[in-house]
Image (spheres, rainbow, N blue to C red):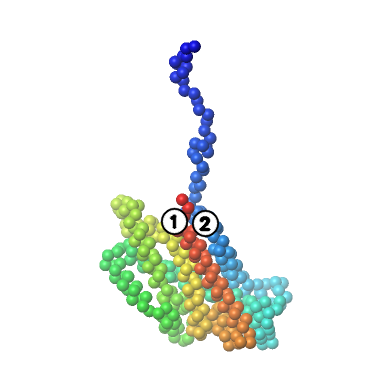
Amino acid sequence: MAVDRREAAIPVAAPPATTEHAAGAAIRQSSLWQDAWRRFLQNKGAVVAAIVFILMCLYCLLIPGFWKIPGIWTSLKDYDPNAVDFSQSYAGFSLDHPFSTDKFGRDLFARVAQGGQISIAIGFAATFMILVIGVVYGSISGFVGGRVDNGMMRFLDALYGLPYLPFAIITTQILSPSGSVSVWTMVVALTIASWFTAARVVRGQVITLKENDYVRAAKAVGARWYRVLARHLLPNTLGILVIAIFLELPGVVLGEAFLSFIGLGINPPTASWGSIAQDGREAYRLHPEVLFIPCLAIATLVLCANFIADGLRDALDPRTRET
C-alpha cells in the first residue's frame, strides 16, 4: 500500500520534555555571602566556637547589671562586682558565689563578667582601629605602587623590627605620665604596635585585584583613583577583613591581659581579666581558682576567635568552594 508522501513528511511531535530532562538538574543560585554562610555552618568546630563566643559576650554584657534588678538573686550585695566584704574573703565555690570570691570578698562571678566587658571592649576597639589604619595604609601603598609603594613598605619593615610588647609598654607610659592607664590608652598602645600585618594583607589583596579587567574598565571610562579604590577594590577585600577581625582579636586581648597582669595596664579597682589574674597571683597556692578562672576566660575567648577565623577562611576562600 502506497504511503502518502505529504503524510510521511509531517514530523511526529515528541513528548514534552520535563524541566528536569530539558535543563538537567536544578542549579543552586546564591550570593557570595549566602554560600559562605552555608559553608560556615558545615564547619562544626567553627559553629560551636561561635556559639560559645556569643554566650561569653552575653555573659560579660548582662551579668554585671543583673545585681541591680530586685528579685534576680536573694542577695544583691553578693553580686555587686565592686562590693567589699572581708568576711567573705576567699569564700570558695557555693551557690551564693559560683566562682568564689577574691581577697576583698568581691564576687568573682560578677567581677569576671565586668572584667570581660573591659577586655573585650579593648579587643574590639583596638581591632577596629588596626583595620582602619591597615586598610588606609595598605590600599594606598598597593594601589599607587612604584616608588611610593617601595618607600611605604620599607618604613613598615623598619617598624616590624620594634618588639611588640615593649613598644606597647613605652606607648602606655608616654600617654599616661601620671601612671593611671585608661581604656583608651590601652587601645591606642595596642593599635600602634599591631597594625603592620593588616597593612601588608590589604596591600597584597589590592595589588592582586587592581589587575582585573573591571578595574581597567573603570579607569578607561575616566573614574578617579579614589572612586576605583572605594567602589571596586576595597569591597572585594571585605572577606579578608572579616577574617582579620578574628585573627587580630586574640592578640589584642592577650596583649591587654599581659600588660594588666604585670601591672602596666588597667589599674585597680577597675577590673579586666588581666588585672583579676594579677590579683589572684598572690594567693594562687592556697586559692588557685582566683587565678584559674580569669585565665580560663582568656583562653576560651582566644580559642573561640581562632576557630571562628579558621571557619571564615574556609568559607570565604574561593579556592575551597565547591564547583
Residue 207: x %, y % from top left: 34, 61
Residue 318: x %, y % from top left: 44, 56
Residue 48: x %, y % from top left: 58, 64
The answer for how far apart the CA atoms under marks 1 and 2 are is 11 Å
Q: Is residue 156 placed above or below 234 in the rendered structure?
A: below
Tell me the kind of residue under disc 2: Arg
Q: Name the residue under label 2.
A: 39
Q: Is residue 15 placed above or below 92 in the rendered structure?
A: above
Pick whichever, 19 or 93, lies toward us.
Answer: 19
Mark 2 residue crowding within 10 angstroms, few (<14) / some (14–19) / many (20+): some
Q: How many labels does the image show?
A: 2
Residue 239: tell me if it is visible: yes
Q: Mark 2 falls on what kind of element?
A: helix
Q: Mark 1 falls on what kind of element?
A: helix
Q: From the viewer's perspective, tell me whether residue 89 is left or right of residue 36.
A: right
Q: Which mark is residue 318?
A: 1
Q: Residue furthest left?
A: 147
Q: Residue at x 34, y 54 (%)?
A: 212
Q: Is residue 184 placed above or below 206 in the rendered structure?
A: below
The answer to which image quadrant residue 240 occupies is bottom left
